[in-house]
Image (cartoon, helix red, strand yellow):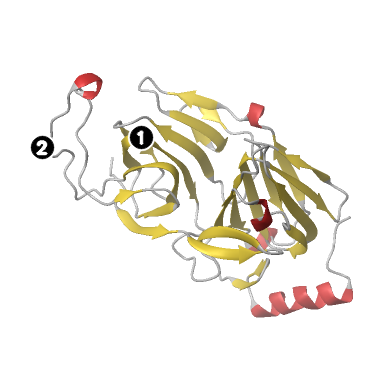
Amino acid sequence: MSLRPVKQIIEAKPTIEGAGVKLRRAFGFGSTKEYDPFLLFDDFRNENPEDYLRGFPWHPHRGIETITYVLTGTVDHGDSLGNGGTLGAGDVQWMTAGSGILHQEMPKGDAQGRMHGFQLWANLPSSLKMTAPRYQDVSSADIPEVIDDDGTRVRVICGDFWGKRGPVDGIAADPRYLDVWVPPLRRKVLPAEVSRHAFAYVFEGSGVFRDASQPQRVKTELVGPNADLPAPLLGDVVGDRSLVLFDRGDEVTVQAGEHGIRFLLVSGKPLEEPVAWYGPIVMNTREELLQAYAELQKGTFIKHR
């Protein structure tokens, strides 16, 4: 077994998208080779309704899949195929845009005005760029959760993990998408296939994702109920709104801080294909991209109804 070294730690940067939604972007709209097959990751979290209620009005997508995971509040959605509905706390929507779709997403806060969710974009291989669009709407109750003996909790949204399989299936990149909680001061080793690119996004608490070159323990004294736990690790402490990009290996190690740590652990098989990208449309060549936008102007963008 080989632990994945930490390649890079990135703090999500403030960004404005849609009709003025204030969010944080960890990566996207640049070189995404190290994240392949993933293209973009946004954390939309706000307690001020004026910063998100204008939402993401009608816009097109082609050539990608969008994964929306709601933690707090709701997101109303609709599309050009006649689909519509509402995502609530803990729900997931995995949308395969394929050959093309027009849709909108309008976030709403909870009773206290709080809104929190994530959106991840996954690329489609050239053979599936023009596939028929489809949705996988998953309610929170259908997402399995695994609880380990030490209190670690993992929601399995997509892929196989610890004997459970997430409800989202048939995804081209064969991704694994996990919501992980590790209790205070606990050290945890999680499997991660060596052939996949992988990253973790921290959104609660803090901890250290140990690089393979770092020592397992440092001298420190722990007393009380945590006296038998591993000592804190050397390395960069990663906190809220931080993304950890891992190098190759088949395990990820994390040690939680004094308040525990919660993060998304995402991995997928690289497509290793050329990317031609402008806005919400991602193709393989510039010619395909120009054609998509020409069809959008002519009203021939939608191929499946």
**Front label number (2 vs 1):** 1
Residue 59 picture location, percent across and down: 76, 64
Q: Residue at x 66, y 59 (%)?
A: 64
What type is the residue that disc 2 sits on? Lys
What type is the residue that disc 1 sits on? His
Q: Which residue is mark 2?
A: 219
Q: Left or right: where does residue 2 sit relative to residue 98?
A: left
Q: Secondary structure at mark 1?
A: strand
Residue 7 picture location, percent across and down: 33, 58
Whether residue 40 is visible to the viewer of this picture, yes or no, is no
136 and 42: which is toward the camera: 42
User: Quadrant location of residue 148?
Assistant: top left
Mark 2, Cα crowd under 10 Å, few <14 / some 14-19 / many 20+, is: few
Q: Residue at x 72, y 41 (%)?
A: 136
Q: Which residue is mark 1?
A: 259
Q: Left or right: where does residue 273 sit relative to residue 96?
A: left
